[in-house]
Image: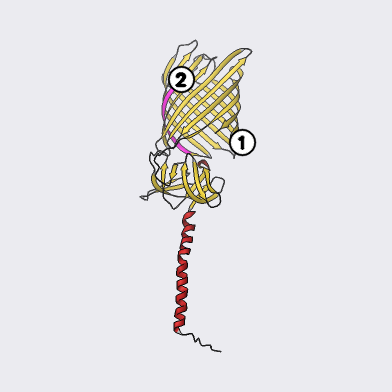
Amino acid sequence: MLQVDTTCPGEVLSMLLQRSLRCLFRLPTILCLFFSISTTWADTVWMNNGDVLSGEIVKLDSGKLSLRTSYAGTIELDWRYVTALDSDKTFWVSLIGENAARLRRFEGRETGITVIDNSGQKRSFSAVWPVAAIHIEQPVIADTWELGGNLVASLDSKSGNDNEWLIGVEGKLNIDDQWNKNAFYWDIELEDDNGIKSSEWQVGYSYSRYLDEHRFVQGAAEQEYDSQEDLRIRTSLGGTLGYRFWETAAGALKTSGGISQLWEAYQTNASQRDYALTWIFNYRTRISNNWEYFANSRTFFRLKQSATLVNINQTLRIGLTDHITWNLTHIVDYDSDPVDKSRNVDSRIKMGIGYQW
């Protein structure tokens, strides 16, 4: 049956007007909700364990990324374990090697990051470590310092022409900011063999200044002492130009080369002084969650004597807790032309319990 709508045009117009007004009054609420969702939690952080966190980036300072979340408040993330960032907001960002922050934003997903300046210039990195600091407001002081290090008590077995056991304590103290790296290190060993006491120690300091995320210059000084060997004291002082391939929580690779001066004092032979070409190699990799492998070497090629000195240090470090570690270290020292002509190679194995912070 045909039905005829008898509603007058005025009533239809009134109904349409009322519906339009209701939608108009709801529009601010809808827009506020939309912008709250799209802007408040617009930042995304990817972690190396596969976690993806959403929130609002507060700052990156002293190796800690502060992220404000709706589910856990403000949390701090270790920057070494962050693999990527993504945000549509602009921050004051400092890259390694820069002495001032600049306005930038981020693009990234899962692994790697692209830093975009206000001018639109893009710089892409395979990891996040070139980013040294992030602030919402322009920082008054561009650099912050971070303190870290480790202390190891060890049992040492040394072999060459002789075999001996020693008790030792070694440690390293790092004081770093985003472009300056200071390292103090020491290794002290004592032996008491049937009342005959002897000692060995090594102390050193190095300073690295990063020019950008890869290139750096380094100055270093070191002194070694052995109460039993004819070579009583060796002191080195020098500078190198280096390149960092990468440095993340999963591993690092750095190398540098330059020139050093050597001073050597002997018990029975005349003291020697020489310049030497220097090559330094540093490698670190994470084997599993709690296992790390370190390989470090230093080579001196003496210019006057045309002789080579090589020190190779390999360490397997196993984390027992967040701070306690078990360390197994193999050290090899090689001298192509030793003064006493007794041996070219010294090899030692050290085991110890360490504390790191």
The quadrant in which residue 207 appears is top left
Percent of width and height locating residue 343: 54, 17
Magenta includes 238?
yes
Percent of width and height locating residue 16: 46, 77
Q: Which residue is mark 2?
A: 235
Residue at 45% over, 28% down = 206
In the picture, the disc for residue 311 is: none
Q: Residues within 10 Å of mark 1 (few under 14, many from 20)?
A: few
What predominant SS class does the magenta segment belong to?
strand
Q: Quadrant of the N terminus?
A: bottom right
Q: Which residue is mark 1?
A: 321
> Marks 1 and 2: which is nearer the front?
1
Question: Which amino acid lies under the numbered mark 1 shown in the image of this protein?
Answer: Thr
Q: Secondary structure at mark 1?
A: loop
Residue extending farthest to the left is 119
- Residue stretch in magenta: 236-246
Residue extending farthest to the bottom is 1
